[in-house]
Amino acid sequence: MEIDFTRLRYFVAVAEELHFKRAADRLMITPPPLSKQIKLLERELGGELFERTYHEVRLTPLGAQLLEPARDILRRVEELKSTASRITQASNPIRIGATAYAPSDFTARFERAVAGLAMPTEFSVPGSAAEVIAKLVSGHLELGLIHLPSADKRIRHRVVATYPGAAAVRFDDPLAANDIIAIEDLRDRDVVIDFARPNPVVLAQMTRGLNARGVTRIVRAVSQLGGELEMASHVFNRYLVALVSYAPASTLGRIFSPPEFKLIPIDESTWAPAKIALAWAPDRLSNRAEIEAIVEQLAAVLS
């Protein structure tokens, strides 16, 4: 008897969820192929694994007896892959990338944490979070640092930092008299969110969120990516408000610092903090257990 390990993984997912739609979401596939693969597995094993009714899914006696052995087999397969990966790829570094648009002080901490790992690594800054995600799903990176949200269902993530929003304004701007503001205080202002433009998902989310709060005068101030100084010039000369993360120790935070500027935190009850996460594409990894162990190590250092 030959058993397909992928079908075995599908069986465990359905057995743990007792719901084909939830199991399919967890496996990042659709329900019809999942149901087909379960039926093929049942044919291989010679008996039904689930009792299916319109309202519920239950394990049959055969399914209940096979669940724990199936889990054990999958654990052993993962251990085998991890061992093989360590032996055959010992000389190959773990490729780790970071978005160029995380606060610079946090990116520096992240790079130091990566350098402190016990295994060889190769660190790069490919560009935006979207570019990091593209490299993860294409297999050109094993691990990445990204801004959330990510719309790609092939990506798993672990949040390692949150940053409140902030308004960067000229020193004599009326808003500069405040130590904290609400997002609604920007309703009658021209607001720049150019730092989100490299990530279309984040840009769309920010635009929708601002519009929902009545902030509709969103303008573009820079013509190219990475134009922090150009952005600061426009904020100063045109009395714009730049919506950024509150990270005073970052390069951007230092640009928007006194005496020319003020960086004002935004009340988190009116504007959700930005989230930065470690991300990986499990189905693209031959050493998934090793990468997830690295995620735990880095999260412990960074969080």
Image (cartoon, grey):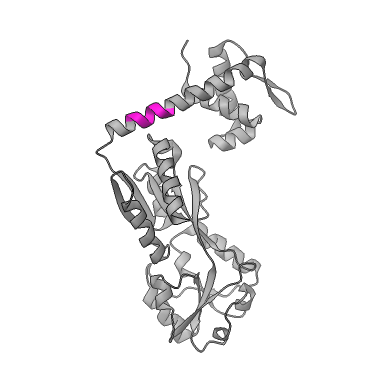
Instruction: Please indicate whether residue 301 sits to the left or right of residue 49 in the image.
Output: left
**Residue 27: x percent and y percent?**
54, 34
Q: Residue 171, relative to residue 274: is it above or below?
A: below
Q: Main secondary structure of the magenta part?
A: helix
Question: Farthest right residue?
Answer: 55
The mark tally for this picture is 0
Residue 36 falls within the magenta-colored stretch? no
Q: Can residue 82 be found in the magenta stretch?
A: yes
Q: Residue at x 39, y 66 (%)?
A: 105
Question: As rendered, which of 66 and 185 lies closer to the eye?
Answer: 66
Q: Would residue 302 appear left or right of 54 to someone viewing this image?
A: left
Residue 151: horizontal and vertical position, in percent?
52, 50
Q: Quadrant of residue 37?
A: top right
Q: Nearer the viewer, residue 290 or 232?
A: 290
Asked whether residue 223 is in view, the answer is no
Residue 143 x %, y %:
39, 47
At x 39%, y 73%, the residue is 228
* Residue 116 visible within the image: yes
Q: Nearer the viewer, residue 193 or 177?
A: 177
Furthest residue to the bottom? 172
Above or below 195: residue 85: above
Q: Which portion, as a residue range, is magenta?
A: 78-84
Residue for point 46% across, 64% down? 197
Q: Position of residue 107 (x, y in %)?
A: 38, 61
Work out which residue is located at the far left of the displayed protein and give it.
91
